[in-house]
Image (cartoon, rainbow, N blue to C red):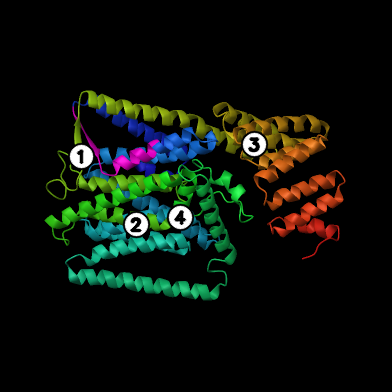
Amino acid sequence: MTIAVLCPVIPEGLPLALLLVAAALWVARLLFSRQVPIVFSLAGAPILVATTYGLIRYGLSPVEAVARQEWLLGSSAALAFFVILNNLRHRWQVTVLTWVLAGIGLGVALGGLWQMLWGGAPDVRVAIYLELIFPVLAANALFSRRPYSARLALLLIGLVTAGAAYLAFDYGAWGGWIGALLVLTVYVIRRRTPRRRWILVGGVTLTAVLLGIFVVDRALRQENFWPRQELAATRLAGWRSAVDIGRQHLWTGGGPGMFRWLYPAHRRTQDQLEFAGNEYLQTFANYGIAGLVLGMWCAVTFGIEVFQILALRGQRYSSSTPSNRYALAVGGLAAFAGLLLVALWNTVSHLPGYLLTAAVIAGATLTSGVKHRGEDPDDNGPLGTYNVFEMKGLAKWAVSGTLTVVILLLGSLMVKTYPAAVFRQQGDRHRAALQWAEAEKSYRRAWAFDALHYETAAALGDLHAARAAWATDQTQELARHAVTWYDRALTRNPYAADLHIKLGRMFDLLGQRATAAAHYHRALQADPRNAAYLAQLGLHELRWGNQPGALAHFQAAYELRGPDPLPERMLQHFDQFAP
């Protein structure tokens, strides 16, 4: 639980590996206990179906390495949800979770504020991550029965996280904060202590007014405060491209993680978009209508369960009675509402820290509706509507075996994915420092771990291409090695049109004009509105003495208004520039 929450500040593979260790301990508990209660909530069914559907789409994906990363994160988040739901207890463990969230939230907030104070650009990931943390801290400060000093500390930390997220000036994160604050405000108003209720509402209103004044003042001082027309156009273009991709693969989508590779055929801007900028449209593009329906099913069932917990609690107790379970349920509901709004302007499913933390908070929230023997909870009697099965005999072995298979599958994928990524990053650092031997050694280690990943093969091709530019006495040999590795990368990811451009350059170097031209044209077939590709084809024609053809390609690239100044400079060089 703690490691999953710590995901934003530690290497990506470590929390997933430790999550598998936690799941393995759960399996051991199932096997070595006579009777073990298994908690299966209403949201469990759609999560299992969605994970199974993701596994099927992963198996059918045209690029295994691209789909693997996304399915690993999604299935790990589902596993974290079930581990937390079945093993979290409302004694000291929820207290640990709350303070771990507070500590990580404070650290992330202070880091974001430090970055902004020293003139750095605000990190959007800070804002959207803190949107998950703040509602839980605020709800515990407002509704829990923790000591006054603890609630005050949580409130102060919550205010720091709110300030850091607000100053990041991400409009999507602001929408999430508004949603979370609305949910918290509704439950504050429902409390039957009028004096405290209206003091809190007045404080929230005053804070909102002061922040609004600050925003207006900053907007008047900075001309580029509000979203620029170019940014809005890029975001809208990404949305439209996602719709086009989803319509082309209506029911099942293009595949996990495939938006980046299918986007060039539906390009509407010269920006190289990796994500749609909207989680719902990203899901539609990658998983089709089936993925959207499953996502809505998960969201609706989670909301229904939390409302059931709060409604049953409200029938039995006064709304002014402090309760740790009630605070956790309200905080989880507020974070969930904020997440739904954040997803309108951001793509968050590729962020391990956000995804795993959301799964941990969701699982912990639903534990507010289940009671285990021997607990000393806030309330007497069960809350919520849960199915708690006493597992024994064949059923216990079946559940344990299924979990073991899942752990082994995830473990086998993680063992080759994350070590390869570490060695690949190490090789990139060596290559940037022109340490050719060390870079090749690191890349080959990455290749030994994961020979299916196109990025490793492409990196080895880039390495040999860079060496060919420096070692003039070995240019031909190194260029041929680069071609070999680019071919291997292209075999593993035929959607990577950039590899055709790199192959074209190598064949130009080898003096094979026709083969080089064929690769440039294949790249343009895959991405016909890419100004950079047209400019590279122009350079190819210029290299072989075809100046009219080169100028035609430079003119076409310039008309697409790409960010690369090369077409304009080449047109000016040949006195053919006409703005």
The spot of residue 361 in percent (x, y) is: 32, 48
Segment tinted magenta in the rendering: 35-52
Residues under labels 2 and 3: Cα distance? Answer: 42 Å
Residue at label 3? 459
Residue at label 2? 337
- Return the disc, 2 or 3, that comes first in the chain's sequence: 2
Residues under labels 4 and 1: Cα distance? Answer: 37 Å
- Return the disc, 4 or 2, that comes first in the chain's sequence: 4
Residue at label 1? 387
Q: Residue at x 31, y 30 (%)?
A: 25
Q: Nearer the viewer, mark 1 or mark 3?
A: 1
- Return the disc, 1 or 2, that comes first in the chain's sequence: 2
Residue type at mark 4 is Val
Mark 3 near mark 4, Cβ–Cβ under 8 Å?
A: no
Q: Residue at x 69, y 37 (%)?
A: 462
Residues under labels 3 and 4: Cα distance? Answer: 30 Å
The spot of residue 519 in percent (x, y) is: 73, 39
Disc sitting over residue 126 in the figure: 4
Residue 51 within the magenta-colored segment of the rendering:
yes
- Return the disc, 4 or 1, that comes first in the chain's sequence: 4
